[in-house]
Image (cartoon, coloured by chain):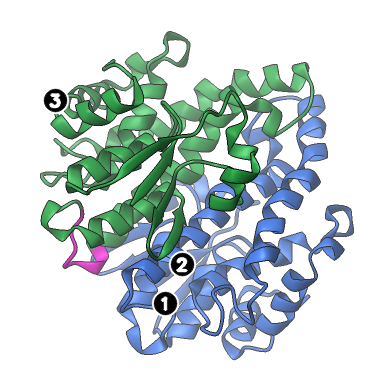
Chain colours: A blue, B green
Amino acid sequence: VKLFYAGGSCALASHIALHEAGAEFEAVKVDLKAGEQKAPEYLAVNPKGRVPALVTRRGTLTENPAILHWIAVAFPNARLAPLGDPWAMAQVLSFNVFLGSSVHPAFAHLFRPGRYAHGEAAAEAMKAKVPEQLGEYFGVVEQQLERGPWVHGEAYTTSDCYLYVFARWLQKPELGPERFPRVRAHLERMQERPAVSRALEAEGLTAL
Amino acid sequence: VKLFYAGGSCALASHIALHEAGAEFEAVKVDLKAGEQKAPEYLAVNPKGRVPALVTRRGTLTENPAILHWIAVAFPNARLAPLGDPWAMAQVLSFNVFLGSSVHPAFAHLFRPGRYAHGEAAAEAMKAKVPEQLGEYFGVVEQQLERGPWVHGEAYTTSDCYLYVFARWLQKPELGPERFPRVRAHLERMQERPAVSRALEAEGLTAL
């Protein structure tokens, strides 16, 4: 198994989950700043030119919520999802899809405004809206963390791995992270896990 | 089971899948133009104020890829996903997540630019970029349809239900739908299915 990732990108979620699962895998870095994700070698792996991509004997799997789901099912002993309960599994999936389809695009307007519109004025207008959008979305997350200590309550799941990525991205003063104390506490709880330390070290990142 | 939907919204995917599954359900319309999705009654169902939301005895489930996954698992006789093969299941999920996290947000910049930036100039700049973004994403879809006749080959899956929503949205001359002939053929193939006809009729929509 090979995981293609970029340092500090959303691929960190799948990276952590592979460590949690105790999987044997190789982590292969894709240098986004050098444009490696658009190089023919990488497009042959993932035609979408994005990370993460997980390569196994069966082929390539992309999109964090799908990779996280597969890891949870393929490594049942790690108990990364409520495998015996389809409704609870769907709730894990729902939270992960919300992160991928609402929270991640909100951040993308900050990091990659050129994906959504040309021009500096439009970029500034989009960036200005990000704290408000994140406020709405992390408000939902903060509510979800009410029970705790993990996203879905007592049991640690792939949703915790995935949330950690965006909790990290949120820790910039201009994004108002102090609005979300449970998200901050979750981030700190995550950083006590050996799997998180190992993934951070492998990507050259530090705890926040 | 109750499905909360808005006419012509992405909830159509879950609506079609429920008909494909032969599920007994009630479809409840949420009037987005009247702002019903932000009314206290609906926020009690789905605090995110979006559709679709599926309500069962177990609670509420949101996000199309999660609802579609649950329907496929809960109604195995309908064979809406490759249930016995976790890797193939993850591929179905991956495609659905791609639609939810890349394709849907691209359209949202056209339909709801105010979600991403204030001001008419920014809205126009975002709208101008949409055909290019859709070109990239539907290029991936067109490639995926090479084998056919369905998204994942011979077997019809929830990915076909979900793609149909965005194939409909694409059929505006200014978005250049003629660039994607396989997507058009898929749309027409979908419209031959009784489950699609029933969902369209229930939502007051016509075949395209």
User: Pointer 1: residues within 10 angstroms few (<14), some, or many (20+)?
Assistant: many
Of the 4 image quadrants, the one containing the N terminus of chain A is bottom left
Q: Position of residue B143 (x, y in %)?
A: 28, 36
Q: Are marks 2 and 1 in contact (CB under 8 Å)?
A: yes
For residue A78, above or below residue B199: below
Q: Which residue is mark 3?
A: B192
Which residue: 52% across, 50% down?
A: A37
Say which element carries label 1. Answer: loop
Q: Which residue is mark 1?
A: A81
Q: Amino acid at mark 3?
A: Glu
**Residues in magenta, as a range:** B81-87
Whether residue B105 appears in this view of the structure is yes
Q: Which residue is mark 2?
A: A92
Label 2 vs 1, first from the N-terminus: 1
Farthest-out residue, top: B173
* Label 2, label 1: how far apart the Cα atoms are: 7 Å
Q: Amino acid at mark 1?
A: Ala
* Label 3, label 1: how far apart the Cα atoms are: 38 Å
Q: Position of residue A203 (x, y in %)?
A: 62, 73
Q: Amino acid at mark 2?
A: Val
Q: Nearer the viewer, residue A49 or B67?
A: B67
Q: Position of residue A87 (x, y in %)?
A: 36, 67
Say which element carries label 2. Answer: helix
